Amino acid sequence: MSHHSQEDQERILELNKEMGDLKTVLGETGKFPDGELNSEDEGEIMFAVATTPNNRIIMHFGKTVTWVGMTPAEARSLAALLEYRADQCEKGVTVKLPDGI
């Protein structure tokens, strides 16, 4: 059973809504919201997290990704989203990737 703070739950719902409303192209945005980490940093990336009918969670980055860096808060948000999607998988809920992806 998962336990999230009210703030986590609100962020999960926000991320879930964004996933449903996603109209942008996945992949790099060309932005560096926290500055460049190092010379290999390609900047911010938009990605989607979905579930499949055969109980798998898919992270789609829209491009080949070698590594991902994030702040502790972003890591917690991603962990909460993955846990939420895992819960959905176990309940048989399918969350499709946006059309064209």
Image (cartoon, rainbow, N blue to C red):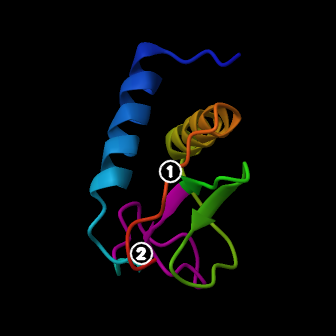
Q: Residue at x 62, y 43 (%)?
A: 82
Q: Quadrant of the rendered structure where residue 78 is?
A: top right
| Near-viewer residue (65 or 62) | 62
Q: Residue at x 51, y 45 (%)?
A: 74
Does the magenta-highlighted stretch encompass residue 39?
A: yes
Looking at the picture, how far across and down is residue 65, in whole percent?
A: 64, 79
The amino acid type of the residue labelled 2 equals Leu
Q: Are marks 1 and 2 in contact (CB under 8 Å)?
A: no
| Near-viewer residue (92 or 73) | 92
Does the magenta-highlighted stretch encompass residue 3?
A: no
User: Which mark sits nearer the N-terminus, 1 or 2?
Assistant: 2
Helix, strand or loop at disc 1? loop
Q: In the picture shown, does residue 33 fall above or below 19?
A: below
Q: CA distance from mark 1 to mark 2?
A: 16 Å
Looking at the picture, how far across and down is residue 5, in whole percent?
A: 49, 15
Identify residue for label 1: 95
Q: In the picture shown, does residue 10 fall above or below 37?
A: above
Residue 14: mark? none
Looking at the picture, how far across and down is residue 101, in whole percent?
A: 46, 77
In magenta, the rendered stretch is 31-49
Label 2 packing within 10 angstroms: few (<14), some (14-19), many (20+)? some
Q: Quadrant of the rendered structure where residue 87 is?
A: top right
Front of the two marks 1 and 2? 1
Helix, strand or loop at disc 2? loop
Identify residue for label 2: 26
User: Can you say which quadrant of the picture contains the N terminus?
Assistant: top right
The amino acid type of the residue labelled 1 equals Val
Q: Residue at x 47, y 64 (%)?
A: 97
| Near-viewer residue (29 or 86) | 86
Looking at the picture, how far across and down is residue 21, in whole percent?
A: 27, 55
Magenta stretch: dominant secondary structure: loop
Give the number of callouts: 2
